[in-house]
Amino acid sequence: MEKFMNEKFFDLKKEKQDRMVNAALKVFAINGYGHASTDDIVKEAGISKGLLFHYFISKLGLYSFIYDYSVKYVTLELFTGVSKEETDYFKLLGQIRQSQLQVMKNYPYMMQFINKSREENVSEALLETEDKRGVLPERYAEIMSRADLSRFKPEADVVKITKVIEYTVDGLMAEHFLNGSFQPEIYHGEMEQYLDMMRKLSYR
């Protein structure tokens, strides 16, 4: 990543850093790497293209930085937001999602960006982020490995239940963003309702 960015970016005021990060997150989240335009990013951030390329040598450099920044930021929120003592499967899922909501309070498009990056098919972007792509999945797996699965009904398929929940809450998030109506508290309330419903259906 060092070859692609100027470390003086971190000397900027935090507000300006976040404005640039949020602009990049939004444009990459909506368009993916291949169709993202640096013109759109600088317009969203309210800066000149010269300034953007002063800190990030190329679009790839910016994407690499944003990806690395997102992984580290989400990892930190998971570390502080998920209880190491919790063993209830649905409470652990809820704490993961709550940590993601904390992320979105500062960086509204960060989770959407991470989700979009899973579909990335441009080889240079994939190669640049290859060594970081396993970090969050491994962290989520480590958290969920603490869950006490003995509480599930014998016929419950935990893998399929997890996928249903993921598709539901991710779809819910995408729907809110599509409607331009995303409010973390409302999303969190709806998410908790789905988790509670699945808990009642799945537990003994």
Image (spheres, rainbow, N blue to C red):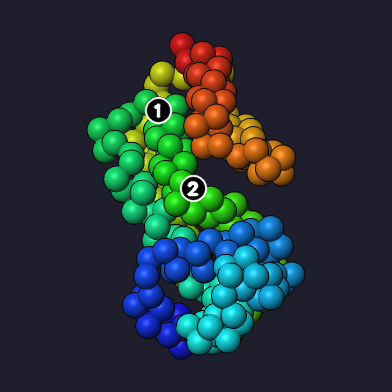
Disc 1 residue type (three-letter): Lys
- Residue drawn at x 57%, y 75% is 47
**From the image, which quarter does the N terminus lie in?**
bottom left
* Residue underneath mark 1: 91
Q: Which mark is residue 126?
A: none
Disc 2 residue type (three-letter): Met
Q: Nearer the viewer, residue 192 or 142?
A: 192
Q: Secondary structure at mark 2?
A: helix
Q: Secondary structure at mark 1?
A: helix
Q: Residue furthest right?
A: 35
| Mark toward the start of the polypeptide (1 vs 2) | 1
Q: Count the marks: how many?
A: 2
- Residue drawn at x 38%, y 54% is 75
- Residue drawn at x 41%, y 78% is 9
Q: Position of residue 203 (x, y in %)?
A: 47, 15
**Discs 1, 2 touching: Cβ within 8 Å:** no
Q: Nearer the viewer, residue 191 or 161?
A: 191
Is residue 78 visible in this depiction of the protein? yes
Q: Is residue 100 left or right of residue 186?
A: left
Q: Which mark is residue 104?
A: 2
Q: Is residue 107 above or below residue 59?
A: above
Q: Position of residue 88 (x, y in %)?
A: 37, 26
Q: Is residue 56 left or right of residue 175?
A: left
Q: Position of residue 184 (x, y in %)?
A: 51, 37
Q: Of the residues tagged 1 and 2, which is closer to the observer?
A: 2
Q: Residue furthest left?
A: 85
Q: Is residue 84 above or below residue 103?
A: above
Task: Specify few, some or many for label 2: CA neighbours under 10 Å numbering under 14, 14-19, or 20 or more.
Answer: some
